[in-house]
Image: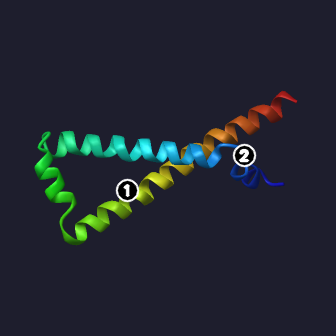
Amino acid sequence: MSSFKKILQAPNFWKSVLFIGLAFVLLYNAIDYAFGYSMHWDQFLEAKWQGSTKWRFIIANLLGGALYGFIISFLRYRKQILQDKHKK
């Protein structure tokens, strides 16, 4: 089995992707809110939840979080597999 498939089938891989992606989205939006909107919640919501902007915001967060979570989790599991292979 290829290491790619082995990583995708590893226990807790997808859970790791989910949690890392969610943490990324929360942290990114907290930083955006703090620095981009000077802690003005009403301005942040107005900018992010108007019309088509709302869907762009949601889709960008879902895709960005999923991609970031996948990459970080994949690299973490790949490193672990390589370390285990060298121990043998």
Determine crowd level at label 1: few under 14, some 14-19, many 20+ residues with C-alpha closer than 10 A.
some
User: In this view, which residue lies farthest toward the top?
Assistant: 87
Which quadrant holds residue 59? bottom left
Please tell me which residue is depicted at 80% across the width and 54% down the height of the picture: 2
Q: Which mark is residue 61?
A: 1
Please tell me which residue is depicted at 15% across the width and 46% down the height of the picture: 41
- Labels in figure, total: 2
Q: x, y percentage for residue 23? A: 42, 41
Q: x, y percentage for residue 10? A: 72, 46
Return the residue nearer the eye: 44 or 80.
44
Reading the image, the residue beneath label 2 is 10
On the picture, is 27 further left or further right than 12? Answer: left
Q: x, y percentage for residue 50? A: 18, 66
On the picture, is 41 further left or further right than 30? Answer: left
User: In this view, which residue lies farthest toward the bottom?
Assistant: 52
Quadrant (top left/top right/bottom left/bottom right) for the N terminus: bottom right
Mark 2 → mark 1, Cα distance in angstroms: 25 Å
**Residue 59 vertical position relative to residue 6 in the rendered view, above or below:** below
